[in-house]
Image (cartoon, grey):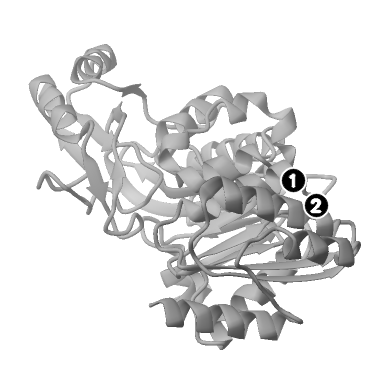
């Protein structure tokens, strides 16, 4: 789950992470009110969407730049009017862009240096790690590729946590000195407290800045949270903005389904993440293009299978469906019953290939055979992939 920049700032303020003053607005009037309350000489107006590259983005109304600086409250109103309700296209949104429903009005900072700081979970060690660099304000991937020596890593002990000597070590690695080291150490310590308290899987601050006054401030941040821990984070769940997400993924989450839309035309319905990945690969190998990743899990119910079918068919690019079920915990007949119910409810008119194997498979095959649906059975995964690719090409 992702959150907006203004929400990240609210978390920073709650945990004592130094940042600039600011507030969020959903209308031009609210933007003016926030600017007046700030009482600063200049204001930054930033479009709020779940994507990077906003400053270089272009709105579909022709207005350029989702991040603007002005010294006029009147201009704040004008900029908010230009951004709110408009679609912003950046290199991360794709050509479809994202609609801006809120803007952040913030106090600008006079930046002397831009740094990079992140805390994330290291899969290799199973513990948090700090990633820092003197090259802030640019993609860390580019730094890693071209100047990897400028990236500093500091492992965090899983039970002891981030220690004071480590915060000072990181500050020195970033070229800080004097009072800046103490300010940075406090910021890093509070950031780690936030990381633990809110079950984060990543906090990325880019840029972390040194101002002309020597202050250390977190200007922009990207948060990711452990979805498995959201049950104990109602405050974080309340921050979710479903308008920023693929409606199909939102619908899938309501049924505890794992769905990711892709750009192909052959939909997959599979139980198990590994099997789903293998199914997508073999569709590609057979000459097709998968339209989605959809894992119904090991114990899906009939209602979940029906919901999965409806989500798949809501994608207008889907021209065929491959169901690949290996029943361990999963009862093949439950899947079969869900397939029949969903296909009849939506009036399925595209090719459907089904491969069932495992727990209660004979009952499942019987349910499908007696359904009256024009589906195609497959003996194994390779056979299923070849058949669905052939059917889709035939239909085209």
Residue at point 58% right, 58% down?
Answer: 131
Question: Mark 1: few, some, or many residues within 10 Å (few <14, many ≥20)?
Answer: some
Which of 14/315 is in front?
Answer: 315
Q: Which residue is mark 1?
A: 302
169 in relation to 21, above or below:
below
Q: Percent x, y for residue 183? A: 52, 37
Q: Nearer the viewer, residue 178 or 229?
A: 229
Marks 1 and 2 in Cβ contact (< 8 Å): yes
How much space separates mark 1 and mark 2, taking CA atoms?
6 Å
Residue at image position (10%, 24%) is 72
Quadrant of the rendering where the N terminus is positioned:
top right
Residue 17 position, x and y percent, is 53, 32
- Looking at the image, is 336 positioned above or below residue 323? above
Q: Nearer the viewer, residue 319 or 349?
A: 349
Q: Which residue is mark 2?
A: 334
Earlier-in-chain disc, 1 versus 2: 1
Q: Which element type, helix, strand or loop, lies under badge 2?
A: helix
Which image quadrant for residue 377? bottom right
Tell me what residue is drawn at x 67 percent, y 43 percent: 227
- The residue positioned 28% from the left and 54% from the top of the image is 96
Residue 319 place in picture, x, y as percent = 45, 68
- In screen coordinates, is 26 left or right of 210? left
């Amino acid at each position: 789950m992702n959150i907006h920049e203004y929400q990240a700032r609210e978390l920073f303020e709650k945990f004592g992470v130094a940042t600039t003053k600011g507030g969020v607005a959903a209308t031009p009037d609210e933007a003016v009110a926030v600017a007046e309350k700030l009482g600063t000489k200049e204001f930054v107006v930033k479009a709020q969407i779940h994507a990077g590259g906003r400053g270089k983005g272009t709105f579909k109304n022709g207005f350029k730049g989702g991040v603007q600086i002005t010294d006029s409250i009147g201009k704040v109103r004008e900029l908010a009017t230009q951004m709110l309700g408009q679609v912003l296209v950046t290199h991360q949104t794709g050509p479809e862009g994202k609609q801006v429903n809120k803007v952040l009005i913030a106090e600008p900072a006079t930046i002397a240096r831009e740094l990079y700081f992140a805390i994330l979970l290291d899969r290799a060690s199973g513990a948090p790690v700090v990633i820092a660099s003197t090259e802030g304000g640019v993609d860390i991937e580019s730094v890693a590729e071209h100047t990897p020596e400028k990236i500093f890593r500091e492992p965090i002990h899983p039970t002891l946590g981030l220690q004071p000597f480590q915060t000072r070590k990181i500050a020195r690695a970033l070229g800080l000195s004097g009072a800046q080291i103490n300010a940075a150490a406090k910021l890093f310590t509070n950031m780690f407290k936030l990381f633990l308290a809110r079950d984060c899987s990543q906090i990325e601050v880019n840029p972390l800045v040194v101002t002309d006054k020597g202050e250390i401030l977190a200007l922009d941040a990207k948060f990711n949270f452990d979805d498995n821990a959201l049950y104990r984070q109602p405050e974080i769940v309340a921050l979710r903005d479903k308008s920023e997400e693929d409606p199909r993924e939102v619908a899938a989450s309501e049924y505890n389904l794992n769905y990711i839309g892709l750009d192909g035309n052959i939909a997959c319905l599979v139980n198990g993440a590994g099997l789903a990945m293998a199914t997508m690969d073999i569709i590609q190998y057979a000459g097709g293009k998968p339209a989605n990743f959809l894992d119904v899990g090991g114990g899906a119910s009939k209602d979940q299978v029906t919901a999965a079918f409806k989500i798949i068919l809501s994608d207008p690019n889907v021209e065929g469906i491959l169901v690949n079920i290996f029943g361990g915990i999963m009862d093949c007949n439950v899947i079969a019953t869900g397939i029949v119910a969903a296909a009849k409810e939506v009036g399925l008119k595209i090719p459907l290939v089904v491969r069932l194997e495992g727990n209660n498979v004979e009952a499942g095959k019987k349910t499908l055979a007696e359904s009256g649906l024009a589906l195609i059975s497959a003996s194994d995964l390779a056979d299923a992939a070849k058949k669905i690719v052939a059917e889709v090409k035939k239909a085209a």
